[in-house]
Each structure stands twice: as structure tokens, then as C-alpha cells.
Amino acid sequence: MRVRPAHPTDALEIAGWFPDAEAVLRWGGHEPPFPVEPEWLAREFRSRSRAYFVAVEGADEDPPLGLIGMRRHFRHGRVHLVRVGVKPDRRGEGIAARLIEAVAGVARAGGADRLTLNVYGSNTAAVRAYEKAGFAQFGTVATGDDPSGIVIRMARRL
Ligand SMILES: CC(C)(COP(=O)(O)OP(=O)(O)OC[C@H]1O[C@@H](n2cnc3c(N)ncnc32)[C@H](O)[C@@H]1OP(=O)(O)O)[C@@H](O)C(=O)NCCC(=O)NCCS
């Protein structure tokens, strides 16, 4: 498995990973439309303020198995992860960790010294994945969007 930059042509496959509005909200918060429009996602991949990467089995042209996005706040020494998602039938294999390691390398090379992310309190699979990848919880923010009532803020040193 390897990680490469996301291409607009990956968008159609990834848009199919989130079958209902709740799944879209958990994955991407309020920004992504439901149903996820491939064209919306392709525009995200072209955006200059963010960078997106996908995990593929082997060759560059293989279909994506997982997605990760990063917002670079290099002036503040920080990279914020967004839209981490793995193809439903490939969850539980540690693909999120592979994506996070790849982005950690990019962030380090850009001079960042920490990664941050936000995750809904009820998303225990995601919290587990992030803890296994070295993240620790450092705070919460109240939200009405999740049954837990909180967004958990997590960070990891690079
Ligand atoms: C959160 C997510 C990215 C984790 O990616 P992953 O590559 O499956 O992560 P891991 O393999 O480390 O598994 C993490 C946890 O998922 C759970 N899990 C295991 N198999 C699973 C499966 N088939 N389906 C769903 N969750 C599973 C387990 O709790 C696992 O923790 P464990 O290894 O301690 O048992 C992935 O579940 C996903 O895409 N979820 C939907 C989108 C989402 O919620 N994104 C996060 C936004 S903040």
C-alpha cells in the first residue's frame, strides 16, 4: 500500500463511501453536501488551501482505499487533518494510520511540529484510530450535531 496525492478522478469512488447524511456529517462535518457530489470533492482536491492524499493498494492508477486532507498552518507550526475516511469494506485494517504517517511526513517537512484534528464524541472507531496513531485528547467543544454533545480536539507531536 502507498499514499499519493488525491486526483479529481478519485472523487467518484470516494463519494460512494458515505451512504447517508449522518455518515457524511461524521466524516466531514457540515461542509460536504449530501449526497456527496463527486464534482464538489474534485474541487476540494484542486483547492490550494488544502492538500488531499489517498491510499492505494499499489500502483498510482489503483482506486483509492482511504482519504485524508490537511490544512497547513505552518506559520503556527501546525497541520490540521480533515476528512479522514476509509472505504467501508477496508475499515479496521489500519489504513487511517498509513494516511496519517504520510501526512505527518509532509507536515514535518514543511516545518510543523504538531498535528491537530477534531472528531465527534460518538465516533469511537475514529477516536481509537487516532489514539493508535499517537494522538491524545486535549479538549472538547460543545455541539448539537452529535449525540455525545461534544467535539473532541486531539493533537499529536511530530
Ligand atoms: C475512522 C476511520 C477513518 C478509521 O480508519 P481505519 O483505517 O478503519 O482505522 P483502524 O483500522 O485503526 O480501526 C480503528 C477502529 O475502527 C473500528 N473498526 C474495526 N473494524 C471496523 C470495521 N470493519 N468497520 C468500522 N469500524 C471498524 C475498531 O474500533 C478499530 O479500533 P481497534 O483496532 O482498536 O479495534 C474509518 O472507520 C472511517 O472511514 N470511518 C467513517 C468516516 C469517519 O468517521 N471519519 C473520521 C472523521 S473525524
Image (cartoon, rainbow, N blue to C red):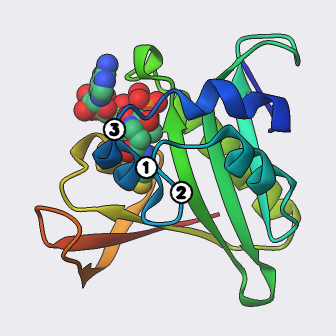
34 left or right of 10?
A: left
- The residue carrying mark 1 is 27
Residue shown at 21% from the left, 61% from the top: 121
Residue type at the position of mark 2:
Pro
Quadrant of the drawing holding the C terminus: bottom right
Residue shown at 87% from the left, 61% from the top: 109
- The residue carrying mark 3 is 20
State the image coordinates of residue 62 (x, y, percent, origin top left): 79, 12
- CA–CA distance between discs 2 and 3? 12 Å
- CA–CA distance between discs 1 and 2? 9 Å
Residue type at the position of mark 1:
Trp
State the image coordinates of residue 54 (x, y, percent, origin top left): 71, 34
Q: Mark 1 against mark 3, which lies toward the viewer?
A: 3
Residue type at the position of mark 3:
Asp
Q: Are marks 1 and 3 in contact (CB under 8 Å)?
A: no
Indicate which disc, 2 or 3, sits on the residue closer to the N terminus: 3
38 left or right of 157?
A: right
- CA–CA distance between discs 1 and 3? 11 Å
